[in-house]
Structures are given as structure tokens and as C-alpha cells.
Amino acid sequence: MASSSSAATTANAAVARSAATRRRGGGPGVFGVLSHIALVVWTILIIGPVLWTFLASFKTNAQIFGDPLTLPTSYSFDSWARAWDKAHIGLYMWNTVFVVALSTAGTMLLGSMAAYVLARYEFPGNRIIYLIFVSGLAFPVFLALVPLFLVVRNLGLLGTHVGVILVYIAYSLPFTVFFLTAFFKSLPTSVAEAALIDGCSHTRTFFQIMVPMARPGLVSITIFNILGQWNQYLLPIVLLPGHVEDKWLITQGIANISVNAGYEADWPGLFAGLSITVVPMVIVYIIFQRQIQSGLTSGALK
Amino acid sequence: MRHGRYPFIIGFLAAPLILYVVFVISPYIQAFYIALTDWRGITATPEFAGFENFARLLDDEVFWAAVRHHIVLLVAMPLLTIAIALFFAYLLNLGGGSRSGRMTGVTGSTFYRVVFFFPQVLAVAIVGVLFQAIYRPDESGVINGVLARFGVEPIGWLTDPNLALWSIIAVMVWQAVGFYVVLFSAGMSAIPKDVFEAAALDGAGRFRMFFSITLPLLWDTLQVGWVYLGIAAFDGFALVQVLSVDRGGPDNATTVLPLEIWRNAFNFSKYGYASAMGVALFFMTITFAVLTLRVTRRERIEF
């Protein structure tokens, strides 16, 4: 009995060893081949549409409506210039850069201030204020849509960038506060205490000691907010309605030229506009892909 | 330590709290009240109407169509996304077998991970416009153009009411998979290597290893992914608004609640009715989140 079971174990180990050797040698099994095919197919599915759009920006209307699997015959940036100027993609880009720069800066400043106080200071109401901030994560923004529109309108901020910036900051706060409170709690307390004993004010302690210490967390959440706010579509179309077209942001601008491309029959212009927005994203993503990946998934991993 | 403590706390909390209460909390509270009024148009004075809006919702075919679509989305989208992402995450982290005692991914894992994640950084609205060209119903569409090479007749991806919602779900999956590949990869790399080693020594094959080791040890991450995707299934606004025919068409075949809320509020100025839909959406989301956390809760495996 004992010898047969030990024989079986030896046999198993031998099988495992041989399997390990086979894998170490990188010998492609059926599974290996199939899995590589799956990976390559998905890669094509991701790159294909983006590449096709880029190439379509160099085609003519006739080519775009012809066989989709042909290459453009000439490469000129006419359609890109048209999209940038005539379709105002350039303007929308700058508007978006302006809005997102200010709103992300505001979000990080206000969010880290609130998170720091909530994480490190005991005072009556601390827990309630924290819960009020975090409760924002449970509500779908669509519930607030009508009253939000009315609040912004009543403040005279409808159709202004200030309105959009303030709303972006407000709606980014729940996650920012939630994430950064946990982060500040995880930092050691001794450094800040030493600074306070040495006579450093609370405000100075925060900006000169705690913020540098919290840098990894701040970087992740900044990336998260930049991307989230850059890609917003719902809030711009509600807060920057049709009569302030010169204030529009990039996502609503693109959606609008996709509607107009049909009337004006400028399809290369549409694809050029798309490329103008997508190509910078590709470049930024390739450079910062590690930070972007960890920034976007940081929330889920908490 | 004491001097200037409260002024400091108040100084740091005042601005974020005021902004948050004005633009987030107060709208959420107002929404519940507006849902109980017959408010139409900016100038009209709202009258209290009790639950009239909710009664009307029950008879509204478009509302029910949207709810049905959310149910389809809620089942199909997370299931497809998680299945594909799990498969790829497994290949990219463990699929290469053990190499000098350590589990590795297949060759080129880093490249694949970078490519797969990319759609995540694109705005949903941009992705919607991108896929209009892919899905065009004649042979000039990219997919139909490819199919034409094989002699397949063009398919109305977005114009066929039976197909349109699935075409939109496919785009959601297309965009989401990379995020969950990265998320699950992080979870998989946290599993100690010796667990796999021990299993390999005991003769476990790839499938056995996946179902008996990786999956159970990844449960927490899967649960997080499921909740995220479920919440995303109650949205879908940008994609449906930009990509679908006639914004939610053909014939309401792809409409979702957020789109109906937006349409009722800003096209028809039916503020009361739109808010009632918002309240309905809120309760659906909350119910889903609570149910998921209850049902999927199980003993945590420490490792």
C-alpha cells in the first residue's frame, strides 16, 4: 500500500517535472498557440480602429465611403488644418486644457486639505463630514442632473468655464477625499508632530512636510482626476449649452462635428478632428503608461 | 499643538465643504423633492404632485425599455468583460508556466498589457464617434468591409433593433477589458508563488490551477470588478447618446435611463419627470450594490 502510493507520488512528481521542463523550454502546446492567437486578435481589435481613423483623416470622402481596407493615396494635413480651424477643434482643445488644468489643481488643493484635516485631526463632526464626502460615491450623477443645472443657472454660471470648473471640483471631491484620507492615515505621524513642537504652524506643516510625504498618493489621484475630467461628456453638454459654442470642450466638440460631418460632407475633417484628440492621448499614454495604469486602478485596489 | 487648531481646521475644510454642499449634496436632496412636482420648463412654477410622476413612469414604455436594457447590460457586460479580462490576465501573468521556479506570463506580456489598457484613457464620447465608422451599415463600414471580403452581406450593426444593443455592449467591453486585465494582474501577482509551485508539483494542469487556485484567491478583486462594472451598466449615457441611431434608437432599442433623464430634462424641459427617473435609477443602483456585496460575500482566504 505504502509503496504503491509513494510510487504514484514519484510518478506525479516526474510528470510535473517533465511538464515544467516542457514549459521552461517554451515549447508551444496547443494551448500556447491558441492563447497567442487570442492575444494578437485582441491587439488588432484595439489598434485597428485607432489606426483606421488616423489613416481615414488622409482619405477623400469618396475613399472613406469606398473600400475601408485601402490606404490613403496621398498624405496631406489639409483636413487636419480644417478640423483645427474651421471645426474649432483647436479652440476646444485649449478650452479643455484651461478647464482641466484649473479644475484638477483645485480638486487636488481642496481635496488634499480636506482629507488631511479629516485624517489627522480629532474634532467633533469629523466622522460625519467624512461620511458626507464619501456618500457622494454612492449617488449616480444623473440623479442630481436637473437640480445641478438649476443651481448653476441660478448662480449665473451657466455657460461659463468657472461654472464647469467648480462643478468638476465638487464632483471629484468624494473620491479624492476618500482616497487621500486613507493615504494620509497611512503616513507616519512622528514627522508632523516634531515639526509642530518646533513651532511650525499647522498650515506650514501641511504644505512643507505632509504634501511632499504624500507625493505618491497625490500623483496617482492627480492622474485619475486629469483623465476623468478631460474625458467628461455629460457635464459639458449640460453646463455649456449650444449658444456658447466658443466655450465648448473637446468631447462635445467632437460629438458635434460627428453630427455635422453628415451635413457638410467633410468626413476627412471628422477623422482628422478625432486624430487630433486621440494622437496626443496615445503619446502621453505611451510615456506615462505605468503611472496612468496605477493611477486609474489605485481606487479599485484600496 | 493647541493654538490655532480650530481656525486651521475650519480654514482647511470650509472651501471644499461649501463647494461640495452647494454643487453635490444640495442637488441630490433637491432631486427627491423635484421628483414629486409637475415642474415643466424653466419659468413655470412647480406644483407639488405627490407620486404622480412615479405612477406615470409605470406606464411609460420607454422607461421600461430602458430598464430592460439595463438588465441586459447588467448581466452581459460584466460577464463578458470579466471572462475576457480574466483569461488575458491569466495568460499575461501565469500563462508562461514556471520558469526557474517562478510563474511568468507569456512572451510579450508587457506589450499586450500596455495595448489592452489604452482604450481606458479615451473619452467614451470619442470612442462612440470612433465606432460610428466601424459599424457603418454598408460596405464602407470597417467591419462590413472586412466581411465583404468573405462574401458576407453587410450587417446593420446599429440599425438592426435586435443587434444594436449588443453592438453597443461590445464597445463597452472593448473599452473596459484592459482596465480589468491590469486590475486582475495586480491581484494575481499578490498570490504567493509557492502556492503555484506546490500545485505544479502535485501535478495540477493549467485549467486546474486556474479554477482551483487563481480564481478563489482572486475573489476579492473579482467582487470589486463586478461592482464597478455593474455600476457602469447603469450608465451608458455617453456611448448611447453618441453612437446609437437617433440617440437611443432605432425605435428605443438601445435607450438607457440616463439618456431618458437627459432627454426629458433638456429636450422636453420636464424637470419633475426627469428627476423621478433619476430617483428610480438611484434606487436601482443602490439595490444592485447592496445585493452584490451580500450575495458574493464569502469567507476571506488569508494568504
Image (tube, coloured by chain):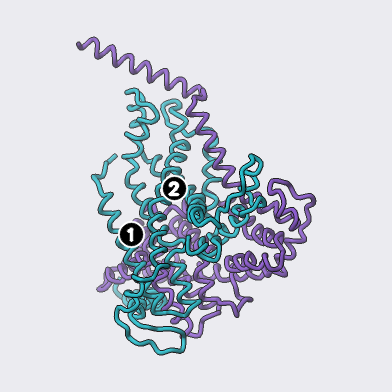
Residue B112 found in image quarter = top right
Q: Nearer the viewer, residue A185 or A160?
A: A160
* Chain identity for the colour cyan used in the image: B
Q: Chain of mark 2?
A: B
> Which image quarter holds the C terminus of chain B?
top left
Q: Which residue is located at x 45 percent, y 43 percent?
A: B84
Q: Which residue is located at x 46 percent, y 84 percent?
A: B41
Q: Answer left or right for A167 relative to B74.
A: right
Q: Are marks 1 and 2 in contact (CB under 8 Å)?
A: no
Disc nearest the viewer among 1 and 2: 2
Residue B151 found in image quarter = top right
- Does residue B16 sit above or below B228 in this rendering? below
Where disc 2 sits, the SS reads helix
Of the residues shown, which amino acid type is indicated by label 2?
Answer: Thr
For the view shown, which residue lies furthest in the left direction? A1
Q: Which residue is mark 1?
A: A185
Q: Which residue is mark 2?
A: B81
Where disc 1 sits, the SS reads helix
Q: Answer left or right for B88 relative to A276.
A: left
Q: Nearer the viewer, residue B80 or A225?
A: B80
The x, y position of residue A1, in whole percent, is 20, 11
The colour chain A appears in is purple
The x, y position of residue B130, in whole percent, is 60, 56
CA distance for labels 1 and 2? 34 Å
Label 1, residues with CA under 10 Å away: few <14, some 14-19, many ≥20: some
Q: Which residue is located at x 34 percent, y 35 percent?
A: B211
Label 2, residues with CA under 10 Å away: few <14, some 14-19, many ≥20: many
